[in-house]
């Protein structure tokens, strides 16, 4: 039986194939210094008819190599997607602008119309932004939908250059009758601070088309937060707003609450570690209670929120039918406050949606007033500057932002993952997918592979309840994993192949006993949109044996 399923899976993998029009060298760790080192890549680009996407992530590209690749791209008019994150590790910062200039010039020469430009995890600073400035202003970017510049060390100067380039692009594209309509903007960990954030806010307000904004860890205080809040009001289609680990204080939080009034499509609000304080949390809770009908996640963790404010937030989400998670960890509730919060959430039948409260700071004696807020902002700004100056020295080594290991989760989920059984999975209830998602570290490919095999081991084709429970759980966990910027898809697939006994590991990992459920669920996931097509090709190569 297992042999038949393997055969079916291999057929399914072959049909799925690699993304049409995509050429990928992702994660190959190549050191590309000169024209000779990229001869193979250049030839494959030249021979690839209808090239639409080029993946160079996880390699290191020098100036001469970039120029050779660029030359090959000059004839690719159908080109759309630049997946060029993490491709300058170990390079001098002075090498990056000319390399980016060459690649950008080639895209413009080709007459291409980009939809995706991803240059995340390239520590190029303000000069790197200058390297893409001409490209961003050109007709090649009039159609841009996703711009990802996470962890690039742009700083205030880079943020201003980027904002000016986007503004100019919008002006020029509008004159052509098709204004720039950027949907996704990612620029976490860039030291943008208030000035950079304010400049970008003006560009966001002008576009009005954003659906996702991710700007965590940027040293933004209430003036910058207020500017962003004003801009967000003009982007009614916004679904995800992630400003984690900036400093709102009460003023910024209240301004952002006012912005939320206009965002009926919002699904994810991440204001964790933003010091929203109790009054800010209550202001946000009021807006949540009055609107935001499709809210799925609300993160107000580590915000110096007291018990009364936390209970107000809990009451505000009681009618949110699509809510999947409320995070109020790391606040100032005290033991009695934590217990009251749990009871409140249980009372509205949402107890399983409340995140861990294990890092609660205990009751807060005196909340800061407005004047102290302003003083805190100034101190926070100075401290963040010092911290970021230390961090920037490490950025060119390719270090990434790590995702914290989740806090302890409900023991019934742990029990299932330790000793999986169909009965245990069903007993987790309707929110089982969310509970498992909270328990498993989705940033760790090896742990994800283990979790995948444990969940899929209880799959039963002839039992609809078990079948649906398994597939729903697997889809939720993997979808979140592949959406996590730091998640390495190839490592996940490699770990799976090791555990299935198809490749050997240097660590002498003992393979699991393969059961039909493993293979049947594999066949399911490779057909899903969240599963990268380049990983399908790797699975196909091994499973077809």
Image (cartoon, rainbow, N blue to C red):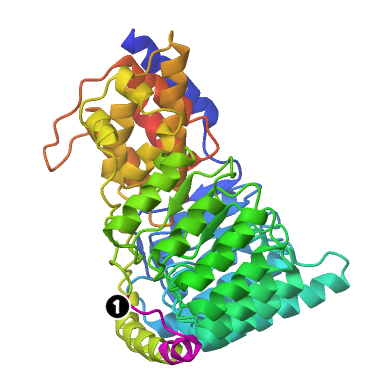
Residue 324 location (% of width, % of height): 49, 44
The residue lying at 71 percent from left, 68 percent from top is 233
Residue 185 location (% of width, % of height): 59, 65
Residue 319 location (% of width, % of height): 59, 44
Check the image and report above or below for 8 versus 226.
above
Residue 264 location (% of width, % of height): 70, 55
| Quarter that holds the N terminus | top left
Seen from the viewer's position, the closer of residues 6 and 261 is: 261
Q: Is residue 533 left or right of residue 135?
A: left
Q: Quadrant of residue 223?
A: bottom right
Q: Is residue 189 left or right of residue 171?
A: left
Seen from the viewer's position, the closer of residues 279 and 382 is: 279
The residue lying at 62 percent from left, 75 percent from top is 255
Mark 1 crowdedness (10 Å alpha carbons): few <14, some 14-19, many ≥20: few
Q: Which residue is mark 1?
A: 394
Is 369 part of what is drawn in magenta?
yes
Q: Quadrant of residue 143?
A: bottom right
Where does the magenta region start and end?
365-376
SS state under label 1:
helix
């Amino acid at each position: 039986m297992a042999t038949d399923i393997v055969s079916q899976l291999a057929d399914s993998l072959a049909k799925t194939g690699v993304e049409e029009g995509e050429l990928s060298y992702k994660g190959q760790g190549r050191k590309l210094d000169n024209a000779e080192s990229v001869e193979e890549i250049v030839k494959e680009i030249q021979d690839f008819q209808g090239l639409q996407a080029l993946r160079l992530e996880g390699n290191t590209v020098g100036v001469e190599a970039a120029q050779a690749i660029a030359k090959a791209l000059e004839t690719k008019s159908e080109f759309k997607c630049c997946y060029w994150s993490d491709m300058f590790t170990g390079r001098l910062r002075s090498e990056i602008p000319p390399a980016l200039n060459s690649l950008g010039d080639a895209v413009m020469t080709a007459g291409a119309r980009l939809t995706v430009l991803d240059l995340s995890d390239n520590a190029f600073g303000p000069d790197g932004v200058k390297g893409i400035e001409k490209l961003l202003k050109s007709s090649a970017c009039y159609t841009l939908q996703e711009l990802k510049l996470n962890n690039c060390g742009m700083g205030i100067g880079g943020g201003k250059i980027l904002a000016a380039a986007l503004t100019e692009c919008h002006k020029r594209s509008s004159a052509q009758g098709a204004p720039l309509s950027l949907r996704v903007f990612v620029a976490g960990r860039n030291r943008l601070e208030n000035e950079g954030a304010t400049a970008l806010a003006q560009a966001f307000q002008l576009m009005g088309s954003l659906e996702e904004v991710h700007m965590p860890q940027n040293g933004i205080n209430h003036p910058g937060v207020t500017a962003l809040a004003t801009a967000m009001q003009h982007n009614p289609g916004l679904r995800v707003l992630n400003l984690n680990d900036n400093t709102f204080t009460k003023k910024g939080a209240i301004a952002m609450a006012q912005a939320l009034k206009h965002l009926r499509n919002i699904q994810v609000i991440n204001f964790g570690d933003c010091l929203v304080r109790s009054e800010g949390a209550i202001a946000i809770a009021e807006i949540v209670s009055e609107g935001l009908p499709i809210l799925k996640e609300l993160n107000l963790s580590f915000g110096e929120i007291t018990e009364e404010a936390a209970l107000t937030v809990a009451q505000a989400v009681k009618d949110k039918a699509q809510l999947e998670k409320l995070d109020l960890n790391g606040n100032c509730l005290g033991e009695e406050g934590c217990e009251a919060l749990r009871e409140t959430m249980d009372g509205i039948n949402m107890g399983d949606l409340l995140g861990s409260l294990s890092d609660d700071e205990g009751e807060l004696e005196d909340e800061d007033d407005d004047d102290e807020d302003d003083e805190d902002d100034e101190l926070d700004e100075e401290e963040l500057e010092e911290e970021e100056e230390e961090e920037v020295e490490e950025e060119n080594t390719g270090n990434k932002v790590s995702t914290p290991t989740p806090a302890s989760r409900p023991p019934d989920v742990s029990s299932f993952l330790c000793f999986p059984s169909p009965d245990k999975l069903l007993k987790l209830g309707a929110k089982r997918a969310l509970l498992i998602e909270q328990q498993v570290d989705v940033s760790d490919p090896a742990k994800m592979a283990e979790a995948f095999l444990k969940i899929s081991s209880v799959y039963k084709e002839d039992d609809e309840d078990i079948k649906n429970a398994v597939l729903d759980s697997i889809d939720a966990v993997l979808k979140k994993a592949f959406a996590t910027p730091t998640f390495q898809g190839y490592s996940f697939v490699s770990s799976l192949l090791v555990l299935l006994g198809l490749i050997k590991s240097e660590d002498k990992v003992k393979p699991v006993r393969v059961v039909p459920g493993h293979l049947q669920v594999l066949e399911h996931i490779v057909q899903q949109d969240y599963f990268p097509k380049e990983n399908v090709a790797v699975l196909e190569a091994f499973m077809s044996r």
